[in-house]
Amino acid sequence: MSDGSHPTRHGVHAPGRAAIAAPHLRTDRWWVSPLVTALGLTAFVAYSTWRAFANSNYYTEPYVSPFYSPCLGTNCADMPLGARWPLFGDWWGLSPALLVLIFPLGFRLTCYYYRKAYYRGFWAAPPACAVPEPHAKYTGETRFPLILQNIHRYFFYFAIPVAGILTYDVVLGFRDQHGHWGHAGLGTLILLINIVLIWAYTFSCHSCRHIVGGRLKHFSRHPVRYRLWSWAGKLNTRHMQLAWASLISVAVADFYVYLVASGAFHDPRFF
């Protein structure tokens, strides 16, 4: 009790804050954005969980699902035209996707934009601008487990080689089932669009921008890093859009490979 008769108030209702009786003064449909975000992320988590544990229909020459590349278990499908490096045994019989997905998912989970998205969508911290959060305390990312968000930069280092391997998979997509070059199908186009979006999202990352141009006192003395920083800065202005576009594209790419590998759809070849 603060004065013997009234309970202690926190946040926007704390002493010294404006005495506004209404929960907020916004008149627009501010709740639409966090709701759509929550539904979109939930749909992706549900789909990716199903596909990660399915352990089937992730390779059909010359395409490999981005969820399963590189394939690091001995229980991987036979992938003569894919990145198959059995380094970790059969992983107790579990899906080999679980060995590699931890890196791109960890990169996205700790991403600055995605933090904002799921903090607002799931935890209402806060649900929207100028709408107070319902929590009595605010500790930010200073305590466990949210303090682990600071490892985002290290996940960025892992995201680079993973994107490089997915690029290798796209290059292999220009081969036919007999290994001849100069061929392409609808799957090749889908995988190509996916990797372009993944690279754009990766390079638009705040950590990337800081790594290439951060802690420099004189840009004039570092023209190359300044140019890279400028390019990363331009991509960074579209970080949210690239985050969603690449999230959708990686799911579409995986689902396409699933359809072709399961025999539900025949991959049309352009040339």
Image (tube, rainbow, N blue to C red):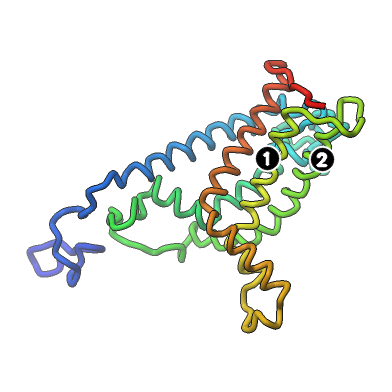
Q: In the orientation shown, which residue stands out farthest toward the left?
A: 5
Q: Position of residue 117 (x, y in %)?
A: 45, 50
Give the vertical position of 68 relative to 12 (above or below). Answer: above
> Residue at left 66%, top 32%?
254
Quadrant including the C terminus: top right
Q: Position of residue 25 (x, y in %)?
A: 20, 54
Q: Is residue 88 left or right of residue 226?
A: right
> Residue at left 10%, top 63%?
6
Query: Residue 240: which disc?
Result: none
Q: Nearer the viewer, residue 76 or 260?
A: 260
Check disc 1 and report the residue beneath it.
Answer: 193
Q: Are marks 2 and 1 in contact (CB under 8 Å)?
A: no
Per the model, the C-alpha gap separating discs 2 and 1 is: 12 Å
Q: Is residue 218 left or right of residue 26?
A: right
Label 2 sits on what residue type? Val
Label 1 sits on what residue type? Ile
Q: Is residue 227 left or right of residue 112?
A: right
Q: Position of residue 231 (x, y in %)?
A: 64, 63
SS class of the residue under badge 1?
Answer: helix
Give the mark nearest the N terminus, 2 or 1.
Answer: 2
Check disc 2 and report the residue beneath it.
Answer: 171
Q: In the orientation shown, which residue stands out farthest toward the front?
A: 271
Q: Nearer the viewer, residue 196 or 21?
A: 196
User: Which of the 4 quarters of the picture holds residue 47?
Assistant: top right
Give the vertical position of 90 relative to 112 (above or below). Answer: above
SS class of the residue under badge 2?
Answer: helix
